Amino acid sequence: MFKRMDHVGLSVANIEKAIEFYRDVVGMEKALDREVDSPLARIIGIEGAKARIVHMKLGQAVVELFDYYHPKGREPRPDQNQSDYGLTHIGFMVEDFDQTYQDLKARGVQFLGEPVEIRPGVFVAYFRGAEHEICEMREIT
C-alpha cells in the first residue's frame, strides 16, 4: 500500500548547476551524493548504466538529481510548456509570495508568465529551474 509521495527525480546535463540552483535559489540542502552503477543498471534495465545521484532536500520533500555517465541523456527542452505531456512541474510552498517573487526575479530566474491569485488567498507563479524544468511557487494565505 502506498503511504505518501517521497520525491521527484530529474536527469540533468549539468548536475553542479542543478545543485547550485536548488541550493541557492530554492534553499534546499544536499542530503545525499553518491555514484551508483550495477544496482542502477539492474533497476533501469540498461547494462553498464552508471550515474551520480544527489538528493536535494527541503523539509520532507526531495528532488533527486541524476547525472548519467552511461547512457547519456538527451538534451533538455528549453521550450517545454506546462501543457506538454509528462511531468509538468515541481511545486514549492513559499512564505511571503510577493517578496519571494521579487527575490527570484532579482536573481534572474525566468518566469513563464505572471504571478496570479488563482483563487482567493492562493497565489501561484511558474518559473524555470536550472535545466528548463518548470517549478511552481505557491502560497496559501
Image (cartoon, rainbow, N blue to C red):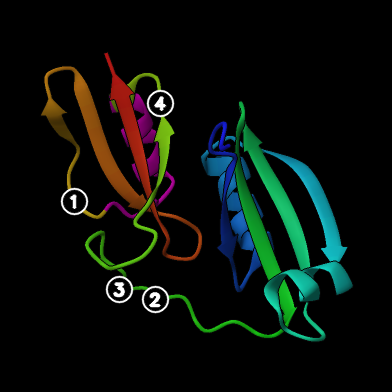
Instruction: Please provide percent x and percent y for residue 3.
Output: 57, 31
Q: Amino acid at mark 4?
A: Val
- Quadrant assignment, res 93: top left
Please give the name of the residue rendered at 32% of the width and 31% of the height, measured from the top-left corner.
138
Sequence-wise, the earlier of marks 1 and 4 is 4
Observer-nearest of 78 and 73: 73
Q: Is residue 51 left or right of residue 130?
A: right
Q: Secondary structure at mark 4?
A: loop
Residue for badge 2: 77
Q: Are marks 2 and 1 in contact (CB under 8 Å)?
A: no
Please give the name of the residue rendered at 21% of the width and 24% of the height, measured from the top-left corner.
122
Q: Are marks 2 and 3 in contact (CB under 8 Å)?
A: yes
Magenta stretch, residue numbers: 98-111
Residue for badge 3: 79
From mark 4 to mark 3, how far is it between C-alphas?
26 Å
Q: Are marks 2 and 4 in contact (CB under 8 Å)?
A: no
Residue for badge 1: 113
Sequence-wise, the earlier of marks 2 and 1 is 2
From mark 2 to mark 3, how far is it between C-alphas?
5 Å
Q: Secondary structure at mark 2?
A: loop
Q: Is residue 102 left or right of residue 21?
A: left
From mark 1 to mark 4, how far is it between C-alphas?
18 Å
Please give the name of the residue rendered at 26% of the width and 40% of the height, measured from the top-left corner.
125
Q: Is residue 138 left or right of residue 10?
A: left
From mark 2 to mark 1, how far is it between C-alphas?
18 Å
Where 89 sits versus 26, above or below?
below
